[in-house]
Image (cartoon, grey):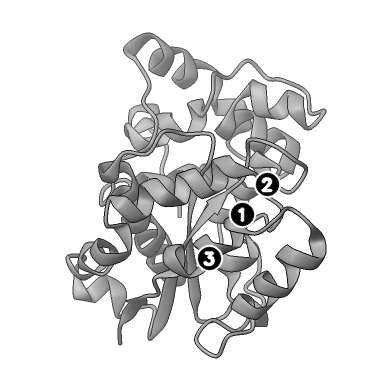
Amino acid sequence: MAITYIPLLTKIRPLYDLPREPDQRFPFYIAQVRDGETIGCPPLVAYNPMGKAHVGAHLDTLIALGVDNLAQAWIEVLPPTMTARLGDMRLGIAVVDDVAGGWTERSAYEMNERFPQTQAKATAGWLTTFVYASEPIELSQVAARVTATVARAAIIATRGVAHTIEQMVAQEALVYQYAMPPFAIDDDEFAYTSAVIGPYLAAVDYPTQVAVLLGDELARRNGFVPLGFAPYAGLAWAARGGLTHHGTSSR
């Protein structure tokens, strides 16, 4: 059983040198998705084929840092007992264009990455690590995202799909035992979140989950009711051991 990294960064990069015309971009894009090695490839599907220069620049930075050459090593340091739960799978990185255009709605990607509710046949056998074009690139964070992708998939394979906020934060607390979280929470915000999160832990509705886990800013972008949570407060609270502090256990 093995997780095999597929170097998609160099594969997709020439797309962003083509003129931004559909008849120029889409034939190349579809050809990459349908390639024998990557057929039905979810990481490639996440790319914006009409992305502007910032997507190409993001890819250039990742390639220059050697991510396509380093990612397999990041995977292989994970405990074999973890990767064995998943069977043979492929993993690829997607640069998600959350800067310009209507291709990406950030909260939808964030939630589906962490809490997929179904495993469609088209994505079976693949894991996708998202890197967001709006964020500066740090190699340590990219490594942590790859590690988190594998750890999360193994945890879901063992524990099942998370439906409530309590189950979601319990899952992410386990994930961040293996990977450095991409967010932090200071003492005051941790105490505040601990004080107000309790009534929402049983919530299963998507608007509440977005507001609590990802924060009011992303909730407002979707037209959801803000609930008083800072950006990524629920997830940062989970990563810092919020459920243990709260005296709550899940599953």
Q: Quadrant of residue 81?
A: bottom left
Q: Which residue is at a point 36% across and 37% down the rendered structure image?
A: 239
**Neighbourhood count class around disc 2 (C-alpha, 10 Å): few under 14, some 14–19, many 20 upward:** few
**Neighbourhood count class around disc 3 (C-alpha, 10 Å): few under 14, some 14–19, many 20 upward:** some
N-terminal-most mark, 3 or 2: 3
Q: Is residue 174 visible?
A: no
Q: Which residue is mark 3?
A: 12
Q: Which mark is residue 112?
A: 1
Disc 2 residue type?
Answer: Ala
Q: Quadrant of residue 68?
A: bottom left
Q: Which mark is residue 108?
A: 2
Residue 129 in the image: above or below residue 89: above
Disc 1 residue type?
Answer: Asn
Disc 3 residue type?
Answer: Ile
3D distance between C-alphas at marks 3 and 1? 23 Å
Q: Nearer the viewer, mark 3 or mark 2?
A: 3
3D distance between C-alphas at marks 3 and 2? 23 Å
3D distance between C-alphas at marks 2 and 1? 6 Å
